[in-house]
Image: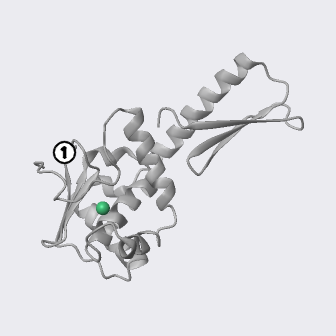
Amino acid sequence: MAEPEVEVRRSKRRRQTVSAYRDGEKVVVLLPARMSRTEEKRWVADMLSRLQRSETRRRSPARESDSALSERCRELSAKYLDGRAKPKSIRWVPPMRTRWASCTPSEGTIRVSSRLKDVPGWVLDYVLVHELAHLLAPGHGEDFWAWVRRYAKTERAIGYLEGLSAAAQLGIDTHADDDTDEAEGD
Ligand SMILES: [Zn+2]
């Protein structure tokens, strides 16, 4: 994520240490009270790139292959969807222009954009839970979201994906994933 919202908090008790953490969609950076604006700017940029690196390190093992992806889906279905979502096929596809993933409920098939191989595992997990939930509830109605929200990081992951799409100017609509949206080749 190139430009998340950043909140800088200065503390008089803090003398040397700088730290940063993610709070919902924003990043909080804690700085000592006596730090110049120039230093602040440098530290904020530094902490953002450190945070991004550590998040990238936590990529999902599902990125390795279609079978690893299927295995992750089995785990997520068992954990969040009472094991009821059983796709017939799920596979990685080359980056799609307008979507992160798509599901064809009538055929039980799910396709996941290779762009998601580089996001943190918890973000990919959200997308997988979302697509799996479509096998139980095809549209984006309340019944659908009731399933998806069993995955606690749903809102945070949506924020991450929207930020990623905006920062990289991908033009991907986080909520567009139905096959009816657009005829698009895999
Ligand atoms: Zn959807």
In the displayed structure, does residue 180 sit left or right of residue 26?
left
Image color mode: one colour
Q: Can you tell which quarter of the image residue 46 is in?
A: top right
Q: Can you tell which quarter of the image residue 42 is in?
A: top right
Give residue 45's position: percent from left, percent from top: 59, 27
Is label 1 in a helix, a strand or a loop? loop
Q: Label 1, on which residue?
A: 94
Give residue 55's position: percent from left, percent from top: 50, 45
Tell me which amino acid carries mark 1.
Answer: Pro
Against 77, residue 39 (above or below) is above
Against 158, residue 38 (above or below) is above
Pick the residue in front: 129 or 106. Answer: 106
In the displayed structure, does residue 72 sit left or right of residue 21?
left
Q: Residue furthest toward the top?
A: 38
Give residue 97's position: percent from left, percent from top: 22, 41
Ligand 1 sits in quadrant: bottom left
The number of discs equals: 1
In the displayed structure, does residue 160 sit left or right of residue 100?
right
Residue at point 46% right, 54% down? Answer: 157
